[in-house]
Amino acid sequence: MSNATPVLSAKGLVKRFGRVTALDETDFELYPGEVLAVIGDNGAGKSSLIKALSGALTPDAGEIRMNGEPVSFSSPMQAREAGIETVYQTLAVSPALGISDNLFLGRELRKPGILGSVFRMLDKAEMRRQATQQLSDLGLLTIQNINQAVETLSGGQRQGVAVARSAAFGSKVVILDEPTAALGVKESRRVLNLIKDVRDRGLPVVLISHNMPHVFEVADRIHVHRLGKRAAVIRPDTHTMSDAVAIMTGAVEVESDAA
Amino acid sequence: MTQSKSNPSVSDHERIAESVSGTLAKRNEPEVQTGLQRLHRFFHANPTAAPAIVLLAAIAAFTMIVGERFLAPFNLSLVLQQVTIIGTLGIAQTLIILTMGIDLSVGAIMVLSTVVMGRMAVEFGLPPALAVTLGLGMGALCGAINGALVTKVKLPPFIVTLGTWNIFFALNLWYSKSETIRSQDIEATAPLLQWMGTSFEVFGARLTYGSLLMLALFGLVWYALNWTAWGRHVYATGDDKDAAELAGIRTQRVLMSIYVVAGLVCGVAAWLMIGRIGSVSPQVGFMSNLDSITAVVIGGTSLFGGRGSIFGTLIGALIVGIFRNGLALAGVDVLWQEFTVGLLIIVAVAIDQWIRRASA
Protein backbone atom coordinates (compact mmCIF):
# COMPACT_ATOMS: atom_id res chain seq x y z
CA MET A 1 0.00 0.00 0.00
CA SER A 2 2.85 2.35 0.78
CA ASN A 3 3.94 2.16 -2.85
CA ALA A 4 0.81 3.97 -4.03
CA THR A 5 0.66 7.73 -4.03
CA PRO A 6 -1.31 8.95 -1.02
CA VAL A 7 -4.59 10.67 -1.90
CA LEU A 8 -3.96 13.11 0.87
CA SER A 9 -0.70 13.58 2.69
CA ALA A 10 1.02 16.06 4.94
CA LYS A 11 4.65 16.51 5.84
CA GLY A 12 6.13 18.42 8.73
CA LEU A 13 2.97 20.32 9.65
CA VAL A 14 3.47 22.87 12.39
CA LYS A 15 0.81 24.93 14.09
CA ARG A 16 1.40 27.05 17.17
CA PHE A 17 -1.15 28.90 19.21
CA GLY A 18 0.92 31.32 21.24
CA ARG A 19 3.22 29.16 23.34
CA VAL A 20 1.22 26.02 22.73
CA THR A 21 2.41 23.83 19.90
CA ALA A 22 -0.64 22.00 18.57
CA LEU A 23 1.12 20.41 15.62
CA ASP A 24 4.77 19.57 16.00
CA GLU A 25 6.09 18.60 12.56
CA THR A 26 3.53 15.92 12.08
CA ASP A 27 3.14 13.70 9.03
CA PHE A 28 -0.01 12.17 7.64
CA GLU A 29 -0.86 9.82 4.79
CA LEU A 30 -4.17 8.63 3.47
CA TYR A 31 -4.04 6.01 0.73
CA PRO A 32 -6.67 5.27 -1.91
CA GLY A 33 -9.57 3.11 -0.82
CA GLU A 34 -8.76 2.87 2.86
CA VAL A 35 -10.36 3.87 6.11
CA LEU A 36 -7.73 5.61 8.19
CA ALA A 37 -8.64 6.18 11.79
CA VAL A 38 -7.03 9.03 13.70
CA ILE A 39 -6.91 8.49 17.42
CA GLY A 40 -5.23 10.36 20.20
CA ASP A 41 -5.76 11.67 23.68
CA ASN A 42 -7.55 14.94 24.25
CA GLY A 43 -5.18 17.76 23.40
CA ALA A 44 -2.92 15.53 21.31
CA GLY A 45 -3.59 17.73 18.30
CA LYS A 46 -6.04 15.50 16.44
CA SER A 47 -8.47 18.25 15.70
CA SER A 48 -5.75 20.70 14.69
CA LEU A 49 -4.49 18.10 12.24
CA ILE A 50 -7.95 17.55 10.81
CA LYS A 51 -8.64 21.26 10.64
CA ALA A 52 -5.42 21.81 8.76
CA LEU A 53 -6.36 19.08 6.29
CA SER A 54 -9.89 20.39 5.80
CA GLY A 55 -8.89 24.02 5.37
CA ALA A 56 -10.33 25.31 8.64
CA LEU A 57 -6.85 26.14 9.90
CA THR A 58 -3.74 27.27 8.06
CA PRO A 59 -0.56 25.57 9.29
CA ASP A 60 2.49 27.70 10.13
CA ALA A 61 4.82 25.32 8.31
CA GLY A 62 4.82 22.08 6.39
CA GLU A 63 3.04 21.04 3.24
CA ILE A 64 -0.13 19.25 2.26
CA ARG A 65 -0.37 17.27 -0.95
CA MET A 66 -3.30 15.82 -2.81
CA ASN A 67 -2.39 12.97 -5.15
CA GLY A 68 1.16 14.18 -4.93
CA GLU A 69 0.39 17.78 -5.88
CA PRO A 70 1.07 20.44 -3.24
CA VAL A 71 -2.10 22.28 -2.19
CA SER A 72 -2.93 24.97 0.31
CA PHE A 73 -6.35 25.84 1.61
CA SER A 74 -7.28 29.10 3.24
CA SER A 75 -10.90 28.14 3.87
CA PRO A 76 -13.02 25.00 4.21
CA MET A 77 -14.70 25.99 0.94
CA GLN A 78 -11.41 25.70 -0.93
CA ALA A 79 -10.76 22.27 0.54
CA ARG A 80 -14.26 21.25 -0.45
CA GLU A 81 -13.73 22.45 -3.98
CA ALA A 82 -10.59 20.34 -4.11
CA GLY A 83 -12.71 17.34 -3.09
CA ILE A 84 -12.14 17.12 0.66
CA GLU A 85 -15.52 16.79 2.34
CA THR A 86 -15.73 17.04 6.09
CA VAL A 87 -18.67 15.92 8.20
CA TYR A 88 -18.45 17.90 11.39
CA GLN A 89 -19.48 16.61 14.75
CA THR A 90 -22.27 19.16 14.76
CA LEU A 91 -23.43 17.59 11.49
CA ALA A 92 -23.96 20.85 9.64
CA VAL A 93 -27.40 19.96 8.38
CA SER A 94 -30.36 22.31 8.42
CA PRO A 95 -32.92 20.66 10.70
CA ALA A 96 -36.04 22.25 9.24
CA LEU A 97 -35.14 21.54 5.63
CA GLY A 98 -35.86 18.25 3.90
CA ILE A 99 -33.34 15.53 3.11
CA SER A 100 -33.14 16.40 -0.55
CA ASP A 101 -32.78 20.12 0.24
CA ASN A 102 -29.98 19.30 2.65
CA LEU A 103 -28.10 17.07 0.26
CA PHE A 104 -28.05 19.83 -2.31
CA LEU A 105 -27.67 22.76 0.06
CA GLY A 106 -25.24 25.23 -1.45
CA ARG A 107 -25.11 23.45 -4.82
CA GLU A 108 -28.71 23.34 -5.95
CA LEU A 109 -29.63 22.23 -9.44
CA ARG A 110 -31.68 24.49 -11.65
CA LYS A 111 -34.12 23.57 -14.34
CA PRO A 112 -32.73 23.48 -17.85
CA GLY A 113 -33.62 26.21 -20.30
CA ILE A 114 -35.19 29.57 -19.64
CA LEU A 115 -36.91 28.46 -16.42
CA GLY A 116 -33.54 27.88 -14.85
CA SER A 117 -31.48 30.64 -16.44
CA VAL A 118 -33.94 33.52 -16.19
CA PHE A 119 -36.38 32.46 -13.49
CA ARG A 120 -33.71 30.62 -11.48
CA MET A 121 -36.18 27.80 -10.92
CA LEU A 122 -34.93 24.81 -8.94
CA ASP A 123 -35.17 21.38 -10.47
CA LYS A 124 -36.73 19.78 -7.42
CA ALA A 125 -37.68 16.57 -9.21
CA GLU A 126 -34.13 15.95 -10.42
CA MET A 127 -32.63 16.76 -7.02
CA ARG A 128 -35.08 14.34 -5.39
CA ARG A 129 -34.20 11.67 -7.92
CA GLN A 130 -30.47 12.05 -7.34
CA ALA A 131 -30.91 12.24 -3.59
CA THR A 132 -32.93 9.02 -3.59
CA GLN A 133 -30.26 7.41 -5.76
CA GLN A 134 -27.49 8.53 -3.45
CA LEU A 135 -29.27 7.28 -0.35
CA SER A 136 -30.11 3.92 -1.88
CA ASP A 137 -26.50 3.48 -3.06
CA LEU A 138 -25.49 3.84 0.55
CA GLY A 139 -28.24 1.54 1.78
CA LEU A 140 -30.11 4.31 3.54
CA LEU A 141 -33.43 3.77 1.85
CA THR A 142 -35.22 3.14 5.10
CA ILE A 143 -35.81 6.86 4.94
CA GLN A 144 -39.35 6.97 3.63
CA ASN A 145 -39.78 10.44 2.31
CA ILE A 146 -36.98 12.36 0.68
CA ASN A 147 -38.72 15.64 1.57
CA GLN A 148 -38.97 14.75 5.23
CA ALA A 149 -37.49 17.41 7.51
CA VAL A 150 -34.12 16.26 8.81
CA GLU A 151 -35.12 17.05 12.39
CA THR A 152 -37.75 14.29 12.24
CA LEU A 153 -35.02 11.70 11.56
CA SER A 154 -33.18 9.71 14.19
CA GLY A 155 -29.60 10.61 15.08
CA GLY A 156 -28.19 7.82 12.94
CA GLN A 157 -30.33 8.76 9.95
CA ARG A 158 -29.20 12.36 10.25
CA GLN A 159 -25.61 11.23 10.35
CA GLY A 160 -26.45 9.15 7.29
CA VAL A 161 -27.72 12.22 5.45
CA ALA A 162 -24.57 14.14 6.36
CA VAL A 163 -22.33 11.28 5.21
CA ALA A 164 -24.36 10.82 2.03
CA ARG A 165 -23.85 14.48 1.26
CA SER A 166 -20.12 14.26 1.82
CA ALA A 167 -19.81 11.15 -0.35
CA ALA A 168 -21.67 12.71 -3.24
CA PHE A 169 -20.63 15.43 -5.65
CA GLY A 170 -17.37 13.93 -6.82
CA SER A 171 -15.55 14.20 -3.54
CA LYS A 172 -12.13 12.57 -3.25
CA VAL A 173 -11.71 12.31 0.51
CA VAL A 174 -14.31 12.08 3.27
CA ILE A 175 -13.35 13.20 6.76
CA LEU A 176 -15.71 12.13 9.55
CA ASP A 177 -15.32 13.78 12.93
CA GLU A 178 -16.63 11.55 15.73
CA PRO A 179 -19.55 10.26 13.68
CA THR A 180 -20.71 7.80 16.34
CA ALA A 181 -20.15 9.94 19.41
CA ALA A 182 -23.79 10.83 20.00
CA LEU A 183 -25.36 7.59 18.80
CA GLY A 184 -26.70 4.47 20.42
CA VAL A 185 -25.35 1.02 19.68
CA LYS A 186 -27.75 0.17 16.87
CA GLU A 187 -27.38 3.54 15.23
CA SER A 188 -23.59 3.37 15.52
CA ARG A 189 -23.67 0.02 13.75
CA ARG A 190 -25.52 1.58 10.83
CA VAL A 191 -23.03 4.41 10.58
CA LEU A 192 -20.09 2.01 10.72
CA ASN A 193 -21.62 0.01 7.90
CA LEU A 194 -22.11 3.24 6.04
CA ILE A 195 -18.41 4.07 6.45
CA LYS A 196 -17.54 0.67 4.96
CA ASP A 197 -19.96 1.30 2.10
CA VAL A 198 -18.33 4.60 1.35
CA ARG A 199 -14.90 2.96 1.42
CA ASP A 200 -16.12 0.13 -0.80
CA ARG A 201 -17.20 2.67 -3.35
CA GLY A 202 -13.56 3.68 -3.57
CA LEU A 203 -13.65 6.83 -1.46
CA PRO A 204 -10.95 6.97 1.20
CA VAL A 205 -12.25 7.92 4.64
CA VAL A 206 -10.52 9.62 7.54
CA LEU A 207 -12.28 8.67 10.75
CA ILE A 208 -11.65 10.60 13.93
CA SER A 209 -13.00 8.71 16.89
CA HIS A 210 -12.56 8.12 20.57
CA ASN A 211 -14.35 4.82 20.37
CA MET A 212 -11.71 2.08 20.19
CA PRO A 213 -14.06 -0.77 19.31
CA HIS A 214 -15.46 1.27 16.43
CA VAL A 215 -12.00 2.24 15.25
CA PHE A 216 -10.77 -1.35 15.37
CA GLU A 217 -13.81 -2.55 13.53
CA VAL A 218 -13.72 -0.32 10.45
CA ALA A 219 -10.21 1.05 10.16
CA ASP A 220 -7.66 -0.41 7.78
CA ARG A 221 -4.90 1.57 9.42
CA ILE A 222 -4.78 3.63 12.58
CA HIS A 223 -2.84 6.85 12.90
CA VAL A 224 -2.02 7.39 16.58
CA HIS A 225 -1.46 11.02 17.45
CA ARG A 226 0.48 12.02 20.52
CA LEU A 227 1.95 15.34 21.65
CA GLY A 228 1.27 17.06 18.34
CA LYS A 229 2.82 14.44 16.11
CA ARG A 230 2.24 11.01 14.69
CA ALA A 231 3.40 8.52 17.28
CA ALA A 232 2.73 5.46 15.15
CA VAL A 233 0.64 3.98 12.44
CA ILE A 234 -0.68 0.55 13.38
CA ARG A 235 -3.01 -2.02 11.89
CA PRO A 236 -5.97 -3.57 13.66
CA ASP A 237 -4.76 -7.05 12.72
CA THR A 238 -1.28 -6.65 14.17
CA HIS A 239 -2.02 -4.60 17.25
CA THR A 240 -4.61 -4.76 19.99
CA MET A 241 -6.63 -2.01 21.51
CA SER A 242 -4.40 -2.06 24.56
CA ASP A 243 -1.41 -1.53 22.28
CA ALA A 244 -3.17 1.47 20.78
CA VAL A 245 -3.94 2.92 24.18
CA ALA A 246 -0.38 2.31 25.31
CA ILE A 247 0.99 4.23 22.35
CA MET A 248 -1.57 6.96 22.79
CA THR A 249 -0.62 7.52 26.39
CA GLY A 250 3.09 7.18 25.79
CA ALA A 251 3.48 3.97 27.80
CA VAL A 252 5.04 2.35 24.73
CA GLU A 253 7.29 3.90 22.13
CA VAL A 254 6.85 2.46 18.67
CA GLU A 255 8.98 2.61 15.61
CA SER A 256 6.86 3.58 12.67
CA ASP A 257 6.78 0.10 11.24
CA ALA A 258 3.36 -0.61 9.83
CA ALA A 259 3.09 2.58 7.87
CA MET B 1 -13.36 -6.52 6.28
CA THR B 2 -10.38 -7.92 8.11
CA GLN B 3 -11.71 -8.93 11.48
CA SER B 4 -9.39 -8.09 14.33
CA LYS B 5 -8.08 -11.23 16.02
CA SER B 6 -7.31 -9.61 19.26
CA ASN B 7 -10.52 -8.26 20.63
CA PRO B 8 -13.32 -10.79 20.83
CA SER B 9 -14.65 -9.00 23.89
CA VAL B 10 -15.65 -6.10 21.72
CA SER B 11 -18.02 -7.96 19.49
CA ASP B 12 -19.41 -9.76 22.53
CA HIS B 13 -20.06 -6.50 24.18
CA GLU B 14 -21.76 -5.16 21.09
CA ARG B 15 -23.85 -8.26 20.67
CA ILE B 16 -25.20 -7.92 24.17
CA ALA B 17 -25.85 -4.24 23.72
CA GLU B 18 -27.55 -4.93 20.42
CA SER B 19 -29.90 -7.45 21.92
CA VAL B 20 -30.74 -4.97 24.65
CA SER B 21 -31.44 -2.25 22.15
CA GLY B 22 -33.40 -4.75 20.08
CA THR B 23 -36.26 -4.24 22.45
CA LEU B 24 -36.11 -0.56 21.69
CA ALA B 25 -35.86 -1.09 17.96
CA LYS B 26 -39.62 -1.03 17.62
CA ARG B 27 -39.38 2.70 17.96
CA ASN B 28 -38.56 2.85 14.27
CA GLU B 29 -41.64 0.91 13.23
CA PRO B 30 -44.73 2.91 12.32
CA GLU B 31 -46.09 3.19 15.81
CA VAL B 32 -49.67 3.68 16.86
CA GLN B 33 -50.11 7.42 17.05
CA THR B 34 -52.40 9.23 19.36
CA GLY B 35 -54.71 11.81 17.84
CA LEU B 36 -52.60 14.58 19.33
CA GLN B 37 -49.39 13.22 17.81
CA ARG B 38 -51.00 12.99 14.42
CA LEU B 39 -52.21 16.58 14.77
CA HIS B 40 -48.71 17.64 15.79
CA ARG B 41 -47.16 15.98 12.77
CA PHE B 42 -49.69 17.54 10.48
CA PHE B 43 -49.01 21.03 11.81
CA HIS B 44 -45.29 20.43 11.81
CA ALA B 45 -45.38 19.55 8.12
CA ASN B 46 -47.89 22.29 7.23
CA PRO B 47 -47.04 25.52 9.00
CA THR B 48 -49.85 27.44 7.29
CA ALA B 49 -52.54 24.99 8.35
CA ALA B 50 -53.13 26.38 11.85
CA PRO B 51 -53.60 30.03 10.78
CA ALA B 52 -55.75 28.95 7.83
CA ILE B 53 -58.06 27.05 10.18
CA VAL B 54 -58.26 30.08 12.49
CA LEU B 55 -59.10 32.33 9.53
CA LEU B 56 -61.90 30.09 8.32
CA ALA B 57 -63.24 29.63 11.85
CA ALA B 58 -63.20 33.40 12.38
CA ILE B 59 -65.08 33.99 9.13
CA ALA B 60 -67.66 31.35 10.09
CA ALA B 61 -68.05 32.76 13.59
CA PHE B 62 -68.52 36.36 12.46
CA THR B 63 -70.97 35.27 9.78
CA MET B 64 -73.07 33.72 12.53
CA ILE B 65 -72.75 36.68 14.86
CA VAL B 66 -73.02 39.56 12.39
CA GLY B 67 -74.95 37.88 9.59
CA GLU B 68 -74.95 38.34 5.83
CA ARG B 69 -73.59 41.85 6.11
CA PHE B 70 -70.22 40.45 7.15
CA LEU B 71 -69.93 37.93 4.34
CA ALA B 72 -70.92 40.43 1.62
CA PRO B 73 -68.23 40.70 -1.09
CA PHE B 74 -68.06 44.42 -0.47
CA ASN B 75 -67.23 43.96 3.19
CA LEU B 76 -64.66 41.23 2.57
CA SER B 77 -62.96 43.29 -0.13
CA LEU B 78 -62.87 46.15 2.35
CA VAL B 79 -60.93 43.92 4.73
CA LEU B 80 -58.49 43.14 1.92
CA GLN B 81 -57.97 46.86 1.32
CA GLN B 82 -57.48 47.45 5.02
CA VAL B 83 -54.74 44.83 5.28
CA THR B 84 -52.87 45.93 2.13
CA ILE B 85 -50.26 48.04 3.91
CA ILE B 86 -49.73 45.70 6.85
CA GLY B 87 -49.71 42.71 4.52
CA THR B 88 -47.01 44.25 2.35
CA LEU B 89 -44.89 45.28 5.33
CA GLY B 90 -45.54 41.76 6.59
CA ILE B 91 -43.75 40.39 3.51
CA ALA B 92 -40.65 42.38 4.45
CA GLN B 93 -41.01 41.36 8.08
CA THR B 94 -41.40 37.65 7.19
CA LEU B 95 -38.17 37.64 5.22
CA ILE B 96 -36.28 39.14 8.14
CA ILE B 97 -37.91 36.93 10.78
CA LEU B 98 -37.17 33.82 8.69
CA THR B 99 -33.48 34.64 9.16
CA MET B 100 -34.01 34.87 12.91
CA GLY B 101 -33.98 38.65 12.84
CA ILE B 102 -36.62 41.24 13.47
CA ASP B 103 -37.18 44.56 11.77
CA LEU B 104 -38.59 47.35 13.90
CA SER B 105 -37.88 49.92 11.22
CA VAL B 106 -40.26 48.77 8.44
CA GLY B 107 -42.88 51.42 9.26
CA ALA B 108 -40.32 54.21 9.42
CA ILE B 109 -38.74 53.11 6.11
CA MET B 110 -42.18 53.17 4.53
CA VAL B 111 -43.00 56.68 5.79
CA LEU B 112 -39.61 58.01 4.73
CA SER B 113 -40.17 56.54 1.27
CA THR B 114 -43.63 58.14 0.97
CA VAL B 115 -42.11 61.50 1.81
CA VAL B 116 -39.37 61.04 -0.79
CA MET B 117 -41.94 60.09 -3.44
CA GLY B 118 -44.22 63.00 -2.50
CA ARG B 119 -41.58 65.70 -2.32
CA MET B 120 -39.75 64.59 -5.46
CA ALA B 121 -42.94 64.60 -7.50
CA VAL B 122 -44.88 67.49 -6.03
CA GLU B 123 -42.24 69.94 -4.86
CA PHE B 124 -39.36 69.24 -7.22
CA GLY B 125 -41.62 68.42 -10.12
CA LEU B 126 -39.76 65.28 -11.14
CA PRO B 127 -41.62 62.88 -13.41
CA PRO B 128 -43.87 60.80 -11.11
CA ALA B 129 -42.40 57.52 -12.34
CA LEU B 130 -38.93 58.74 -11.39
CA ALA B 131 -40.22 59.94 -8.01
CA VAL B 132 -41.69 56.50 -7.31
CA THR B 133 -38.42 54.87 -8.35
CA LEU B 134 -36.47 57.17 -6.03
CA GLY B 135 -38.85 56.28 -3.21
CA LEU B 136 -38.31 52.58 -3.85
CA GLY B 137 -34.57 53.24 -3.96
CA MET B 138 -34.79 55.00 -0.61
CA GLY B 139 -36.47 51.91 0.83
CA ALA B 140 -33.73 49.65 -0.53
CA LEU B 141 -31.05 52.03 0.79
CA CYS B 142 -32.54 51.99 4.28
CA GLY B 143 -32.65 48.20 4.10
CA ALA B 144 -29.02 48.15 3.00
CA ILE B 145 -28.07 50.28 6.02
CA ASN B 146 -29.84 47.83 8.33
CA GLY B 147 -28.21 44.93 6.52
CA ALA B 148 -24.72 46.43 6.74
CA LEU B 149 -25.11 47.06 10.47
CA VAL B 150 -26.28 43.48 11.00
CA THR B 151 -23.74 41.71 8.78
CA LYS B 152 -20.67 43.97 8.88
CA VAL B 153 -20.83 45.60 12.30
CA LYS B 154 -22.46 42.40 13.63
CA LEU B 155 -25.04 44.03 15.85
CA PRO B 156 -28.24 42.19 16.77
CA PRO B 157 -31.09 43.00 14.35
CA PHE B 158 -33.36 44.07 17.20
CA ILE B 159 -30.94 46.79 18.31
CA VAL B 160 -30.02 47.85 14.77
CA THR B 161 -33.60 48.36 13.70
CA LEU B 162 -34.63 49.91 17.00
CA GLY B 163 -31.96 52.50 16.30
CA THR B 164 -32.72 52.98 12.64
CA TRP B 165 -36.45 53.13 13.36
CA ASN B 166 -35.80 56.32 15.32
CA ILE B 167 -33.20 57.60 12.87
CA PHE B 168 -35.33 57.03 9.77
CA PHE B 169 -38.33 58.58 11.47
CA ALA B 170 -36.35 61.64 12.51
CA LEU B 171 -34.92 62.02 8.98
CA ASN B 172 -38.44 61.76 7.68
CA LEU B 173 -39.64 64.56 9.95
CA TRP B 174 -36.64 66.69 8.97
CA TYR B 175 -36.99 66.07 5.26
CA SER B 176 -40.74 66.62 5.21
CA LYS B 177 -40.47 69.57 7.62
CA SER B 178 -43.27 67.73 9.41
CA GLU B 179 -45.65 68.91 6.71
CA THR B 180 -48.30 66.85 5.01
CA ILE B 181 -48.52 66.95 1.22
CA ARG B 182 -52.20 67.33 0.48
CA SER B 183 -54.12 64.86 -1.60
CA GLN B 184 -55.32 67.59 -4.01
CA ASP B 185 -51.75 68.70 -4.74
CA ILE B 186 -50.68 65.15 -5.53
CA GLU B 187 -53.72 64.63 -7.71
CA ALA B 188 -52.92 67.81 -9.64
CA THR B 189 -49.21 67.21 -10.21
CA ALA B 190 -48.50 63.50 -9.89
CA PRO B 191 -51.58 61.29 -10.06
CA LEU B 192 -49.35 58.24 -10.61
CA LEU B 193 -48.53 58.37 -6.91
CA GLN B 194 -52.16 57.68 -6.08
CA TRP B 195 -52.65 55.14 -8.86
CA MET B 196 -52.43 52.22 -6.44
CA GLY B 197 -55.61 53.46 -4.80
CA THR B 198 -57.59 53.12 -8.04
CA SER B 199 -60.44 50.73 -7.44
CA PHE B 200 -62.75 48.69 -9.61
CA GLU B 201 -65.69 46.45 -8.92
CA VAL B 202 -66.13 42.73 -9.55
CA PHE B 203 -69.24 40.91 -8.29
CA GLY B 204 -69.89 43.56 -5.71
CA ALA B 205 -66.34 43.41 -4.39
CA ARG B 206 -64.31 46.62 -4.53
CA LEU B 207 -60.69 45.88 -5.32
CA THR B 208 -57.81 48.32 -5.58
CA TYR B 209 -54.72 47.98 -7.75
CA GLY B 210 -52.82 48.23 -4.50
CA SER B 211 -54.36 45.13 -2.99
CA LEU B 212 -53.76 43.25 -6.23
CA LEU B 213 -50.12 44.34 -6.22
CA MET B 214 -49.83 43.10 -2.66
CA LEU B 215 -51.20 39.70 -3.68
CA ALA B 216 -48.82 39.60 -6.65
CA LEU B 217 -45.92 40.44 -4.36
CA PHE B 218 -46.88 37.58 -2.06
CA GLY B 219 -46.87 35.27 -5.07
CA LEU B 220 -43.48 36.53 -6.22
CA VAL B 221 -41.84 36.16 -2.83
CA TRP B 222 -43.42 32.73 -2.41
CA TYR B 223 -41.80 31.71 -5.69
CA ALA B 224 -38.44 33.12 -4.67
CA LEU B 225 -38.52 31.39 -1.28
CA ASN B 226 -39.70 28.00 -2.51
CA TRP B 227 -38.38 27.63 -6.01
CA THR B 228 -34.98 29.31 -6.03
CA ALA B 229 -31.69 28.45 -4.38
CA TRP B 230 -31.77 31.86 -2.72
CA GLY B 231 -34.97 30.92 -0.93
CA ARG B 232 -33.50 27.64 0.32
CA HIS B 233 -30.48 29.57 1.58
CA VAL B 234 -32.71 32.04 3.41
CA TYR B 235 -34.39 29.18 5.26
CA ALA B 236 -31.09 27.41 5.93
CA THR B 237 -29.49 30.61 7.25
CA GLY B 238 -32.38 31.23 9.62
CA ASP B 239 -32.57 27.61 10.66
CA ASP B 240 -28.95 27.09 11.64
CA LYS B 241 -26.51 29.74 10.51
CA ASP B 242 -23.36 27.77 11.34
CA ALA B 243 -24.63 24.70 9.54
CA ALA B 244 -25.53 26.78 6.50
CA GLU B 245 -22.06 28.31 6.56
CA LEU B 246 -20.42 24.86 6.70
CA ALA B 247 -22.59 23.76 3.80
CA GLY B 248 -20.95 26.50 1.80
CA ILE B 249 -23.64 29.16 1.91
CA ARG B 250 -22.38 32.70 2.19
CA THR B 251 -24.79 33.56 4.96
CA GLN B 252 -23.68 37.17 5.33
CA ARG B 253 -24.55 37.78 1.70
CA VAL B 254 -27.91 36.07 2.15
CA LEU B 255 -28.65 38.26 5.16
CA MET B 256 -27.60 41.40 3.33
CA SER B 257 -29.84 40.54 0.38
CA ILE B 258 -32.75 39.89 2.74
CA TYR B 259 -32.44 43.33 4.31
CA VAL B 260 -32.20 45.08 0.96
CA VAL B 261 -35.21 43.21 -0.43
CA ALA B 262 -37.16 43.95 2.76
CA GLY B 263 -36.32 47.65 2.41
CA LEU B 264 -37.44 47.61 -1.20
CA VAL B 265 -40.71 45.96 -0.22
CA CYS B 266 -41.21 48.74 2.36
CA GLY B 267 -40.73 51.16 -0.53
CA VAL B 268 -43.52 49.40 -2.42
CA ALA B 269 -45.65 49.63 0.73
CA ALA B 270 -45.00 53.39 0.63
CA TRP B 271 -46.50 53.64 -2.84
CA LEU B 272 -49.51 51.58 -1.72
CA MET B 273 -49.82 53.84 1.31
CA ILE B 274 -50.08 57.01 -0.80
CA GLY B 275 -52.71 55.26 -2.90
CA ARG B 276 -54.65 54.30 0.19
CA ILE B 277 -54.70 57.58 2.11
CA GLY B 278 -54.26 59.90 -0.87
CA SER B 279 -51.89 62.26 0.88
CA VAL B 280 -48.31 62.02 2.14
CA SER B 281 -48.15 62.39 5.87
CA PRO B 282 -44.90 62.08 7.82
CA GLN B 283 -46.88 61.10 10.91
CA VAL B 284 -48.89 58.15 9.60
CA GLY B 285 -47.75 54.56 9.60
CA PHE B 286 -44.44 54.64 11.43
CA MET B 287 -45.92 52.44 14.14
CA SER B 288 -46.96 49.74 11.69
CA ASN B 289 -43.80 47.77 12.48
CA LEU B 290 -45.62 46.17 15.41
CA ASP B 291 -48.68 45.33 13.30
CA SER B 292 -46.45 43.72 10.70
CA ILE B 293 -44.79 41.57 13.36
CA THR B 294 -48.25 40.64 14.59
CA ALA B 295 -49.27 39.47 11.11
CA VAL B 296 -46.12 37.38 10.76
CA VAL B 297 -46.45 35.77 14.18
CA ILE B 298 -50.15 35.00 13.82
CA GLY B 299 -49.33 33.62 10.39
CA GLY B 300 -47.27 30.90 12.02
CA THR B 301 -43.73 32.02 11.16
CA SER B 302 -41.42 31.21 14.00
CA LEU B 303 -39.56 34.06 15.70
CA PHE B 304 -36.68 31.61 16.10
CA GLY B 305 -36.04 31.57 12.37
CA GLY B 306 -36.06 29.06 9.56
CA ARG B 307 -39.71 28.06 9.79
CA GLY B 308 -42.80 29.58 8.36
CA SER B 309 -44.34 30.50 5.08
CA ILE B 310 -44.98 33.74 3.30
CA PHE B 311 -48.66 32.99 2.74
CA GLY B 312 -49.00 32.43 6.47
CA THR B 313 -48.32 36.14 6.84
CA LEU B 314 -51.07 37.01 4.38
CA ILE B 315 -53.42 34.82 6.38
CA GLY B 316 -52.15 36.39 9.60
CA ALA B 317 -52.83 39.89 8.29
CA LEU B 318 -56.29 38.77 7.14
CA ILE B 319 -57.05 37.23 10.54
CA VAL B 320 -56.29 40.54 12.24
CA GLY B 321 -58.35 42.40 9.60
CA ILE B 322 -61.27 39.98 9.92
CA PHE B 323 -61.32 40.23 13.70
CA ARG B 324 -61.19 44.02 13.67
CA ASN B 325 -63.86 44.25 10.99
CA GLY B 326 -66.12 41.61 12.51
CA LEU B 327 -65.90 43.02 16.02
CA ALA B 328 -66.59 46.52 14.68
CA LEU B 329 -69.64 45.30 12.76
CA ALA B 330 -70.83 43.46 15.85
CA GLY B 331 -70.76 46.79 17.63
CA VAL B 332 -67.98 45.85 20.06
CA ASP B 333 -65.87 48.66 21.51
CA VAL B 334 -62.52 49.27 19.76
CA LEU B 335 -60.59 48.43 22.90
CA TRP B 336 -61.76 44.83 22.61
CA GLN B 337 -60.28 44.68 19.13
CA GLU B 338 -56.88 45.42 20.65
CA PHE B 339 -57.58 42.91 23.39
CA THR B 340 -58.40 40.21 20.84
CA VAL B 341 -55.34 40.91 18.72
CA GLY B 342 -53.20 40.62 21.84
CA LEU B 343 -54.80 37.30 22.67
CA LEU B 344 -54.26 36.03 19.12
CA ILE B 345 -50.53 36.83 19.30
CA ILE B 346 -50.07 34.90 22.52
CA VAL B 347 -52.09 31.91 21.32
CA ALA B 348 -50.20 31.90 18.01
CA VAL B 349 -46.79 31.87 19.69
CA ALA B 350 -47.94 29.20 22.15
CA ILE B 351 -49.02 27.02 19.23
CA ASP B 352 -45.72 27.71 17.46
CA GLN B 353 -43.76 26.57 20.51
CA TRP B 354 -45.76 23.36 20.60
CA ILE B 355 -45.30 22.70 16.90
CA ARG B 356 -41.61 23.49 17.02
CA ARG B 357 -40.97 20.75 19.59
CA ALA B 358 -39.43 19.01 16.65
CA SER B 359 -40.06 15.40 16.02
CA ALA B 360 -43.24 14.06 17.52
Image (spheres, rainbow, N blue to C red):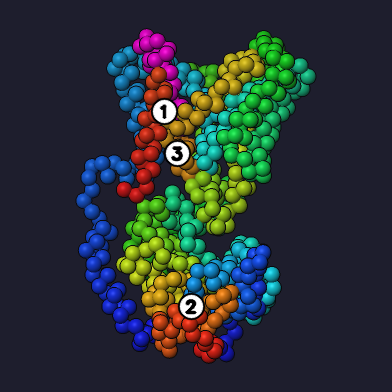
Q: Chain of mark 3?
A: B
Which residue is painted at 34% across and 83% down in the image?
B7
Badge 2 vs badge 1, beta-carbon distance below 8 Å: no
Which residue is painted at 65% across and 11% down in the image?
B183
Q: Amino acid at mark 3?
A: Ser
Q: Which residue is mark 1?
A: B345
Which residue is painted at 35% across and 23% down in the image?
B59
- Segment colored magenta: B313-338
Query: Disc 2 versus disc 1: distance between alpha carbons?
Result: 58 Å
Question: Does B324 appear above or below A138?
Answer: above
Q: Is residue A175 left or right of residue B265?
A: left
Q: Which mark is residue B302?
A: 3
> x and y percent of residue B212 in the render?
52, 27
Q: Amino acid at mark 2?
A: Thr
Magenta region, mostly helix, strand or loop? Answer: helix
Query: Disc 3 versus disc 1: distance between alpha carbons?
Result: 12 Å
